[in-house]
């Protein structure tokens, strides 16, 4: 694939139809990060994505990059965050984005 053929990243407002995928991604991402055997069960019956979406849909967004490789890119991001924390002797690293801040 040439650079001209590469898929473009799209960032757009989250829609209600995005919630099942967002929930799965959130659970698997955090469950994988903390190393539980079944990462898709992380958070149990809590419903963080829907709760946050419903509290202020205008503050929710999705990033979509068509094609394969998202898992590897996310794993690379997690590894970089772990390395960053280890370099600085941090026991934990909290990251977030608040697009609703004024």
Image: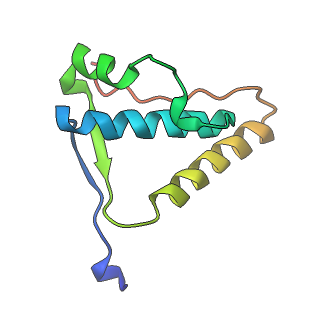
Q: Is 91 rendered above or below residue 5?
A: above
Horizontal side of 98 relative to 84 (left or right) equals left
- State how the image is colored: rainbow
Quadrant where the C terminus sits is top left
Q: Is residue 15 visible?
A: no
Horizontal side of 84 relative to 48 (left or right) equals right
Horizontal side of 97 relative to 55 (left or right) equals right
**Which residue is farthest top?**
55
Q: Is residue 35 visible?
A: yes
| Percent of width and height locating residue 1 | 37, 84
Q: Is 37 rendered above or below residue 65?
A: above
Q: Quadrant of residue 24?
A: top left
Residue at screen point 41% across, 30% down: 97
| Percent of width and height locating residue 10 | 25, 54
Number of numbered markers: 0
| Percent of width and height locating residue 79 | 66, 49
Residues 16 and 3: in front is 16
Residue at screen point 53% across, 39% down: 29
Residue at screen point 24% across, 39% down: 18
Residues 51 and 98: in front is 51
Residue at screen point 76% across, 29% down: 90
Q: Quadrant of residue 38?
A: top right
Residues 101 and 75: in front is 75
């Amino acid at each position: 694939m040439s650079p001209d053929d590469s898929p473009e990243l799209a960032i757009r407002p989250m829609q209600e139809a995005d919630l099942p995928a967002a929930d799965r991604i959130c659970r698997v991402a955090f469950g994988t990060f903390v190393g539980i055997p079944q990462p898709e069960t992380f958070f149990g019956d809590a419903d963080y994505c829907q709760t946050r979406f419903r509290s202020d849909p205008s503050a929710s967004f999705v990033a979509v990059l068509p094609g394969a490789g998202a898992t590897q890119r996310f794993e690379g991001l997690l590894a970089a965050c772990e390395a960053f924390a280890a370099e600085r002797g941090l026991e934990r690293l909290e990251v977030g984005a608040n697009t609703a801040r004024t």
